Amino acid sequence: MIDPLARVRTPADPACDVYLTGAVFLDIIFTGLDSAPVRGTESWARGMGSSPGGVANMATALARLGLHTSLAAAFGDDKYGEYCWETLERGEGIDLSRSRTPRGWHSPVTVSMAYEGERTMVSHGHEAPPPGPEPAAASVPETRSAVVSLAPDRPQEWIAKASAAGSLVFADTGWDETGRWDLEALPDLAYCEAFLPNAAEAVRYTRTDDPRAAAHALAERVPLAVVTMGADGAYGVDARTGESAHVPAIVVEALDTTGAGDVFMAGFVTGSLAGWPLADRLALAGLTASLSVQEFGGSLSAPGWNEIETWWRNAQALTPPSGAEGDGPSLVERYAFLTGLLPAAGEPWPRRRAVPTLGFRG
């Protein structure tokens, strides 16, 4: 396993690299649908997978990139919850010492249907019994960083305390169902090192009509602002240095886009903690996201360094190098920073992938 932070670690550093909290779902994913399901008809999917979902997407992506990851979450007191716990703790090496299993509480479930490059999701679940899936602020470990999802008018007390203790807080957000799109409704943004909304969210929050303009406006609020733009890649602004960077997306045929944003965040956090230049952070984030959408599910689709190394060898073998758009650097030039990080080809590390069912007897 590669340790991307090996060059910056010291004996005084905390044992935890990234802390996060949230709800763990059991995800069931259908792919190979030709169109959206039609009311009153039955649709058959050509592919199906099951995997831990929800906050497990982010936790797994971080762990597979070699970060020491601690997750505080509620797990269902059922076979789904047992499967998710075992997969994350034993399969991925994620610290679940701050997680719990409320007695008699069933796992939340999401069914995701992928078609025409998009997805439709149906979820069911109930809020976990007190103290809930989010821990008390006092239980947050000493950690290099934390990953959070901000929602309007829902401040989380532990974020300010984690920031005050020296943790770098990386945040994303979701669609504002209130329709206000008011940054003042996200008070925890003041404690964040980086904010990574998508283009639709960014332009609404900043009242701009261009994702790049939105990134610059957000950089007045946070040290690092990154706007993800789907097929157009990602654009970032470092408010401390004035640096900006755009990295095009790597074009792939997507099987399932579930969790791609979480994997992008994991790549960006990894590069940030390692102290890489802004463009290299965006490049790793985009690469890991593009690799993830070629597999089922959100959590178990996340790539590790062996998949990245395989991709890099194949990219270098292309003649001429391809994949970059516009007048920027070629694909091989853009990802040259991987050369000093990745090992020579070795035995592939067997990664779990989403499977059609759970609990085969043999």
Image (tube, rainbow, N blue to C red):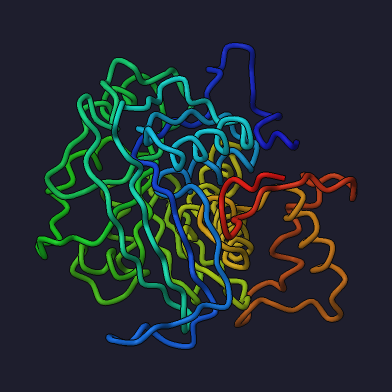
What residue is drawn where x is 54% and y is 52%?
A: 278
Which quarter of the picture shows residue 199? Answer: bottom left
- The percent coordinates of residue 108 (x first, y second) are 33, 47
**Residue 87 spot, x, y in % from top left:** 57, 38
Q: How many marks?
A: 0
Residue 232 vs residue 7: left or right?
Answer: left
The relative height of residue 33 versus residue 137 in the rendered view (above or below) is: below
Look at 28% across and 54% down and name the residue there.
124
Q: In which quadrant will I find the C terminus?
A: top right
Image side of residue 177 versus residue 320, left or right: left
Picture quarter with the N terminus: top right
Please provide percent x and percent y for residue 140: 36, 21
Q: Identify whether 247 is placed above or below 348.
A: below
> Going 74% across and 37% down the picture, which residue do you hit?
2
Would residue 203 appear left or right of 96 to someone viewing this image? Answer: left
Q: Residue at x 43, y 72 (%)?
A: 113
Quarter of the image where one finds residue 330: bottom right
| 181 lies above or below 87 | below
Question: Residue 153 in the image: x percent, y percent?
Answer: 11, 45
* Front in this rendered view, residue 62 or 160: 62
Which of 158 and 292 lies nearest the eye of the viewer? 292
